[in-house]
Amino acid sequence: MSEKIYDYDPSVALDSEQAIAVFLADALETGDAAYIAKAMGVVARAKGMTQLANETGLSREQLYRSFSEQGNPTLKTMLAVMRALGVELTARPHHPA
């Protein structure tokens, strides 16, 4: 008997600002720029690239490129997208384990 494997798209579960905030906070905690960019891409897909492009004034192509696995979004892009998503970037003291 063969086991069926299904593709899972995490963007499907990101249906509220709270879910998006938790998802992005988890990504930011990794400190891995590539992972954070990829997570932002997942969130952008959940919101809809066209809608996000309209709300940020950025092109869809720029959003796809910035949040691809090889992407390197600028801080300006990150802040614009986060604002459009209804989340904010905050700072807190770092306490190493």
Image (tube, helix red, strand yellow):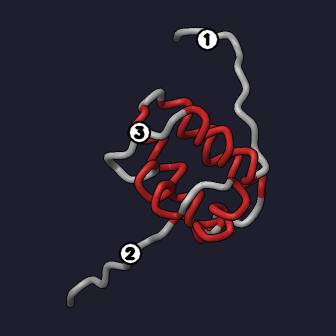
Please, what secondary structure does the residue beneath circle 2 have? loop
Q: Which residue is mark 2?
A: 7
Q: Residue furthest left?
A: 1
Q: Are marks 1 and 2 in contact (CB under 8 Å)?
A: no
Specify which label sits upstream in the sequence, 3 or 2.
2
Please, what secondary structure does the residue beneath circle 1 have? loop
Residue 88: x and y in percent read 75, 37
User: Which amino acid lies under the numbered mark 2 shown in the image of this protein?
Assistant: Asp
Residue at image position (51%, 35%) is 74
Q: Are marks 3 and 2 in contact (CB under 8 Å)?
A: no
Spatial CA distance of label 3 from label 1 is: 24 Å
User: Which amino acid lies under the numbered mark 3 shown in the image of this protein?
Assistant: Asn
Spatial CA distance of label 3 from label 2 is: 26 Å
Between label 3 and label 1, give the one nearer the viewer: 3
Dot label at residue 72? 3
* Residue 35 placement: quadrant: top left
Vertical relation: 53 (above or below) 67: below
Q: Is residue 74 left or right of residue 32?
A: right
Residue at image position (63%, 62%) is 53
Vertical relation: 9 (above or below) 69: below
Specify which label sits upstream in the sequence, 1 or 2.
2
37 or 66, nearer to the observer? 66
Vertical relation: 35 (above or below) 49: above
Residue 79: x and y in percent read 66, 38
Dot label at residue 17? none
Crowd band around label 1 with a 10 angstrom C-alpha radius: few (<14), some (14–19), many (20+): few
Spatial CA distance of label 1 from label 2 is: 36 Å
Q: Which residue is mark 1?
A: 94
Between label 3 and label 2, give the one nearer the viewer: 3
Q: Residue furthest bottom?
A: 1
Please, what secondary structure does the residue beneath circle 3 have? loop
Q: Is residue 69 left or right of residue 81?
A: left
